């Protein structure tokens, strides 16, 4: 079931003409009367479908997903940014030892304090991008953080500030931060699914990106990844199940890699500190025996420029480092290139930098994780690769991940003094799903 959530949060409240001031006034007066019933509480924060409150089964589903994604326990202290009227917090408080809810709408906070209070909950009126000491005090150190259906009303610089505030407040202590219901740019046409809605959206974008059918800003997972990489943080992004939304995603941010228990590698965004390794790899003639491109000596200056381009956010590529578990050693790179958002396809590229790390299954694991990101997070429909016909190990790894042979380019590459064939392999989302997704 698709439904709209118009949960608005703060933006530059000091400017009375700003979108933030508008949304603050909007939510302070949304219901227009003091809430009494559960339906009133749902309507007060626009948890509605066709102006009717969503079934409580949806709220229960949200609580279960939040608890599972954050692995909440009675030992946890949870800070809920943009908590609204405490509709979810009353239920979440049963999963944690302490909960602090913060919101910029005074009316919502007063409702929470009156109707959704619990011995282990504290509600605080405040600006969620303020230093945490001003919101929770210096003695409270939450280890779990939550923002439900609200990131759409923030800009990337503000998310950067929130993460910086958390890190400063915790002074190196570990934490996890779940942001749910993020409007997913790559799925937005599922929301603007009629010519009229699409036209209204395009018109709104020309006027302002912040008051767009109540949705706010449409985010891409790669944008969040870039911000997390700056702070040395890790993330896992997943699209929400259709029972909640077919155009929103959830992101878990953590101080440690978020991987499956049996995983031997994890992926992260490239950053400029990778320069020494990538420069060494790109000047390694041995590596290019396995790649379709030809070897060329690369200067440190040229490598730095190449890396800056890969580190910068791009709508048409995803550039990731392959790192070992548990130590985090960077052993190779994997990319999605030439992403076509209309046809929803992209090419995949991969290399393991040093020979000592090859033939150990790291490439296969990296491919598997990137496919999950491509099909489940980015909503791509087809991934294709090209590889030397002589690279038997690569062919085996791609076949194990579900890729099928689509063609052969005769004498397409010149390697070590002779022309060799290049194979084309592909995998569609239907094929990926038929194999059970993550194999």
Image (cartoon, rainbow, N blue to C red):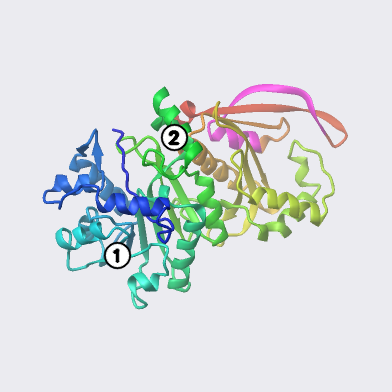
Q: Callout 1: helix, strand or loop? A: strand
The stretch drawn in magenta includes residue 45: no
Mark 1 or mark 2: which comes first in sequence? 1
Nearer the observer: mark 1 or 2; the answer is 1
The percent coordinates of residue 268 (x first, y second) are 56, 52
Q: Residue furthest right?
A: 417
With 298 as the anchor, is 197 left or right in this view? Answer: left
Q: How many marks?
A: 2
The percent coordinates of residue 5 (x first, y second) are 31, 42
With 231 as the anchor, is 348 left or right in this view? Answer: right
Residue 52 is tagged as none
Could you tell me which quadrant the N terminus lies in? top left
Q: Which residue is mark 1?
A: 125
Query: In the rendered image, which quarter is residue 335 located in?
Result: top right
Query: In the rendered image, which quarter is residue 336 located in?
Result: top right
With 242 as the anchor, is 386 left or right in this view? Answer: right
The percent coordinates of residue 176 (x first, y second) are 41, 60
**Residue span colored magenta:** 394-414
Residue 188 is tagged as 2
Q: Callout 2: helix, strand or loop? A: helix
Query: In the rendered image, which quarter is residue 213 located in?
Result: top left
Residue in the picture at 57% in, 45% down: 366
Decide: few, some or many residues near mark 1? Use Cα within 10 Å; few <14, some 14-19, many ≥20.
some
Residue in the picture at 50% in, 51% down: 224
Q: Residue furthest left?
A: 36
The percent coordinates of residue 423 (x first, y second) are 69, 27
Q: Are marks 1 and 2 in contact (CB under 8 Å)?
A: no
Looking at the picture, tell me which residue is in the foreground, 358 or 203.
Answer: 203
The stretch drawn in magenta includes residue 403: yes
Decide: few, some or many residues near mark 2? Use Cα within 10 Å; few <14, some 14-19, many ≥20.
some
Cα distance in 3D space between marks 1 and 2:
32 Å
């Amino acid at each position: 079931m698709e439904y709209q959530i118009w949960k608005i949060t703060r933006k530059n409240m000091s400017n009375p003409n700003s979108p933030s001031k508008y949304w603050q006034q909007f939510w302070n007066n949304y219901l227009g009367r003091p809430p009494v019933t559960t339906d009133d509480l749902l309507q007060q924060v626009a948890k509605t479908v066709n102006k009717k409150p969503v079934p409580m089964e949806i709220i229960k589903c949200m609580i279960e997903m939040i608890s599972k994604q954050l692995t909440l326990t009675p030992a946890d202290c949870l800070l809920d940014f943009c908590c609204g009227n405490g509709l979810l917090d009353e239920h979440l408080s049963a999963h944690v030892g302490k909960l602090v809810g913060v919101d910029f709408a005074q009316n919502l906070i007063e409702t929470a304090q009156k109707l959704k209070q619990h011995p282990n909950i504290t509600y605080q009126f405040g600006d969620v991008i303020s230093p945490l000491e001003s919101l929770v005090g210096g003695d409270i150190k939450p280890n779990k953080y939550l923002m439900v259906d609200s990131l759409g009303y923030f800009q990337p610089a503000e998310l950067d500030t929130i993460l910086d505030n958390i890190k400063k407040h915790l002074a190196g202590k570990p934490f996890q931060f779940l942001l749910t219901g993020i409007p997913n740019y790559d799925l937005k046409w599922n929301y603007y699914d009629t010519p009229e809605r699409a036209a209204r959206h395009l018109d709104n974008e020309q006027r302002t990106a912040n008051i767009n059918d109540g949705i706010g800003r449409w985010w891409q997972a790669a944008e969040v990844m870039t911000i997390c990489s700056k702070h040395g943080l890790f993330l896992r992004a997943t699209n929400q199940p259709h029972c909640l939304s077919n155009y929103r995603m959830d992101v878990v941010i953590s101080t440690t890699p978020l991987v499956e228990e049996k995983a031997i590698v994890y992926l992260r965004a490239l950053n400029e500190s990778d320069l020494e390794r990538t420069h060494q790899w790109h000047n390694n003639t041995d590596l290019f025996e396995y790649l379709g491109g030809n070897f060329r000596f690369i200067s440190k200056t040229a490598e730095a420029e190449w890396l800056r381009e890969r580190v910068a956010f791009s709508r048409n590529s995803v550039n990731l480092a392959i790192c070992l578990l548990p130590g985090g050693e960077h052993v190779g790179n994997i990319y999605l290139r030439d992403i076509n958002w209309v046809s929803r396809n992209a090419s995949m590229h991969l290399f393991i930098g040093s020979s000592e790390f090859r033939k150990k299954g790291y490439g296969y694991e990296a491919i598997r994780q990137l496919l999950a990101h491509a099909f489940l997070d980015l909503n791509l429909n087809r991934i294709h690769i090209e590889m030397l016909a002589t690279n038997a190990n690569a062919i085996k790894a791609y076949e194990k991940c579900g890729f099928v042979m689509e063609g052969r380019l005769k004498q397409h590459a010149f390697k070590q003094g002779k022309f060799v064939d290049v194979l084309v392999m592909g995998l569609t989302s239907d094929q990926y799903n038929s194999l059970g997704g993550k194999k």
